[in-house]
Amino acid sequence: MHVDEPHQDDLSSRLNWLRAGVLGANDGIVSTAGLVVGVAGATSDRTAIFAAGVAGLVAGALSMAGGEYVSVSTQRDTERAALRQEARELRDMPEEEERELAEIYQAKGLSPELAEEVARELTAKDPLRAHAEAELQIDPDNLTSPWQAAWASLVAFAAGAVVPLVAIVLPPTSWRVWACALAVLAGLAITGVVSARLGASRVGRAVRRNVVVGSLTMLVTYYVGLLFGVTIG
């Protein structure tokens, strides 16, 4: 294996961030599309539609970022607590912990003798890392970052939300809802393809799911807007 070849953990981490980014963009497209199409059903005033879309973009992006920050901060706190507990156990009962590590590798298929040797050598080199990775599936030097998750969610949601916002504001009044719908469906098709590729699943199913959900969202909110329609001027 080449020295610069990415490790499986690094690859999985990058894929998780990419998948989260795609989902954030998908949320931005659908929620903002539902908002601006609903407002367009209520009024033809371009300023009102744009203001509602921008407000939805900002509120949604901040909400996503805040939720992700809280969620990942909780996960990080849990990881740190688990590492502290593991460090105490290694300090207070090192022999039991080494035996436990050997049992883990034995359960993975190593012979008892080899498992004991692996556990002994790993413990001698870096006991906390050895036990954290085998028992907890945690890399002590690569804990989840709440700020990174928050910024990624904010940027992804905002990028997705721009699609329906621009598509409904720029065209003439008679075309704006259809232009927005087409742009949204194209964006959802793209996020469906990307998410399917990342998850090694069927592209057609992911695209259909995204398109159907987005279409229903716009259809329902548009008619809700019509129910509360107002006349400008």
Image: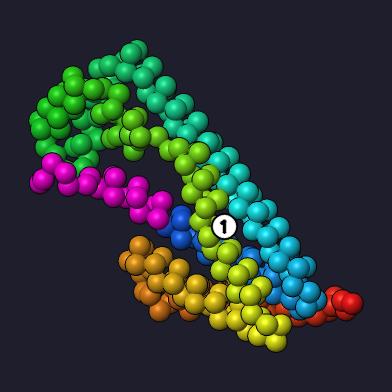
| Residue found farthest to the top | 92
Residue 187 locus on image (x, y percent): 50, 72
Residue beneath the point at 39% across and 52% down: 16
Magenta stretch bounds: 1-18
Residue 123 locus on image (x, y percent): 21, 22
| Residue found farthest to the bottom | 174
Residue at which label 1 appears: 158
Residue type at tag 1: Ala
Residue 227 locus on image (x, y percent): 83, 79
Q: Quarter of the image holding residue 39?
A: bottom right
**Residue 225 visible somewhere in the drawing:** no
Q: Is residue 59 left or right of residue 123?
A: right
Q: Quarter of the image holding residue 192?
A: bottom left
Q: Is residue 87 left or right of residue 39?
A: left
Residue beneath the point at 28% across and 16% down: 94
Q: Quarter of the image holding residue 224?
A: bottom right
Q: Badge 1: few (under 14), some or many (20 or more) residues near its Cα, within 10 Å? A: many
